[in-house]
Amino acid sequence: MPDNALAKDMMKRFLPIAALVLAACPAAHAAESPWVEVAPDTRMRLISNDLVVNGKTMAAIELDMPAATKTYWRIPGETGIPAQLDLAGSTNVESGEIVWPYPLRQIEHGFVDFVYKGETLLPVALTVGSGAAEVTANVMLGVCDQICVPVRAELALTINPARPDRRQGLRIQQALADVPAPWAGDATIIGDVIIDPVSRRLDVAIDTAQVDPQSVIIDNGDPGLLFSMPQKSPEAGLVSFELLGKRAGEGLQGQPVRLTFLTENGAFEVSRIVRMRDR
């Protein structure tokens, strides 16, 4: 495990909030907003498919980053921050949220993070009223290369249902293909999740014929509660995940956790209730 001094040093690489890059751009009447440069060689914009069905439509935050530059998943890991989306300045937009594609697991300097690298699309599911909608998205996220900076941009465009954009719609659909779907198959693909507070780990029954154990990510929605890379358990049929940091997992017993994983048919997720190990 990395020591506290190294952890603090990594976090210092994120420049203070006062150094945020703040950029605003005028509303665009096409299916994409103008590009905004948010960091060296990194720019961001908003795109949409302009296709509204029953009040629902899809947009996406598009990041044009060098191949080695990264941003973070909804559970960023030990050193990152996830994207945050504020649509309060929008007109005729009732709600919106980022829909997260399956991330890349990265271990660097002993830290485990969940990231996206290079060119990235983060789909955004929107609920809008009838007619055109003016989307004003205040986006804040972490961008990391040699140094890590939190950046912010205000992006704006018009959702015009009378003029669907098939090209951007196809690109958004391709990104959505990597979003984990609820698993509706054999329930034993991911079995019991058992906590052992003494050894500070979760043991999970996984059907390794269907699931790559190294692809499994566990979270309970709390970015501060993190688990290690999957490890083979001494017990047959189980995969172990150690709790990272000082938190021993108190309160997890009886609570749901989400397990995100890959199969040959793509990314899926299931929810399981954590049980205490019998002694």
Image: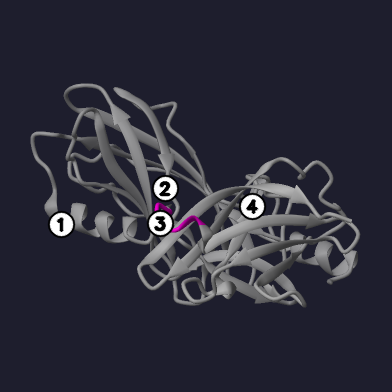
Alpha-carbon distance for marks 1 and 2? 20 Å
Say whether marks 3 and 2 touch (CB < 8 Å): no
Identify the mark nearer the N-term, 1 or 2.
2
Identify the mark nearer the N-term, 4 or 1.
1
| Amino acid at the residue labelled 4 | Asp
| Residue 106 place in picture, x, y as percent | 61, 73
Q: On the rendered structure, is 165 left or right of 120?
A: left
- Where residue 114 sits, quadrant-wise, is bottom right
Q: Residue 99 carries which label?
A: 2
Identify the residue under disc 1.
Answer: 167
4 or 2: mark nearer the eye: 4
Alpha-carbon distance for marks 3 and 2? 22 Å
Identify the mark nearer the N-term, 4 or 2.
2
| Amino acid at the residue labelled 3 | Gly
Identify the residue under disc 4.
Answer: 219
| Amino acid at the residue labelled 1 | Arg
1 or 2: mark nearer the eye: 2
Identify the mark nearer the N-term, 1 or 3.
1
Residue 184 in the magenta stretch? The answer is: yes
| Amino acid at the residue labelled 2 | Val
Q: Residue 185 carries which label?
A: 3
4 or 1: mark nearer the eye: 4
Say whether marks 4 and 1 touch (CB < 8 Å): no
Residue visible at 66% across and 63% down?
204
- The image shows residue 33, relative to residue 95, as above or below, that is below
Q: Residue 103 carries which label?
A: none
Q: Quick one: SS at disc 3?
A: loop
3 or 2: mark nearer the eye: 3
Which residues make up the magenta segment? 183-187
> Is residue 41 among the parts visible in the rendering?
no
- Where residue 27 sits, quadrant-wise, is top left
Residue visible at 38% across and 66% down?
266
